[in-house]
Image: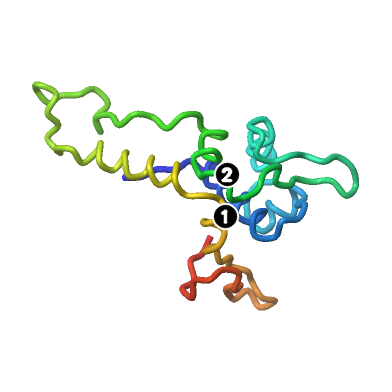
Amino acid sequence: MLRISEAASLALHAMGLMAQTRRRWSNEELAGRLKASAHHLAKVMQRLVKAGVIRSVRGPHGGFELLRAPETISLADIYEAVEGPLPAPECLLGEPLCRGGDCMLGDLLHSVHNQVHHYLLNTTLAHMAGGLQLVSLDGLGAASYAEQGPSSHPSPV
């Protein structure tokens, strides 16, 4: 039921990488690590620059770096920089068909929306990055998990 666009997902993952390493990343490095289109990622990164959460440095040693401390950036800041404000919950059919405004699913849509909104507003980039483990491929093409966070359970990107 929860849909996060590819652009928002790229923004969250790229910011997670940047928060973990606290170094400057080139667009090509990030795109390679995230297995994403460099062109699409560049557009996403420019939205984050415009929102003031990262900065872009030009030149041969340029790239993107965090502009603010990860503890001061909420996941909502990142999501909204790319997608705009979280949309209000709406009927799954588009046009409400239930009479009297009572949804046949009860309060499910509002409840899920409120939980997601609360999570994005109250979870910092530092918290998310702390639990992020990234999948990397060894020379043989086998997946291995880079131990970068406190969690011992691998979760592929």
Of residues 88 and 128, the one drawn nearer to the viewer in this rendering: 128
Position above or below: 32 against 46? below
Q: Position of residue 84 (x, y in %)?
A: 50, 29
Which corner quadrant holds the N terminus? top left
**Horizontal and vertical percent position of residue 154:** 49, 71
At a point 63% along the width and 38% down the height, the residue shown is 44
Numbered disc 2: secondary structure: loop
Contact? badges 1 and 2 (CB < 8 Å): yes
Residue under label 1: 126
The answer to whether residue 76 is left or right of residue 15 is: left
Is 88 located above or below residue 146 in the figure? above
Residue extending farthest to the left is: 99
Label 2 CA crowd tier, 10 Å (few <14, some 14–19, many 20+): many
Can you tell which quarter of the image residue 101 is in? Answer: top left
Q: Amino acid at mark 1?
A: Ala
Q: Which residue is mark 2?
A: 73
Q: CA distance from mark 1 to mark 2?
A: 8 Å
Measuring 49% from the left and 76% from the top, which residue is drawn there? 152
In the image, what residue occupies the spot 27% across and 26% down?
Answer: 94
| Numbered-mark total | 2
Structure colour scheme: rainbow
Please give left or right for residue 132 compared with residue 88 in the image: right
Q: Quadrant of residue 40?
A: top right
The residue at the point 69 percent across, 53 percent down is 30
Query: SS class of the residue under badge 1?
Result: helix
**Amino acid type, residue under disc 2 in the picture:** Ile
Specify the label residue 139 is tagged with. none
Q: Residues within 10 Å of mark 1 (few under 14, many from 20)?
A: some
Q: Quadrant of residue 82?
A: top right
Q: Earlier in the sequence, mark 1 or mark 2?
A: 2
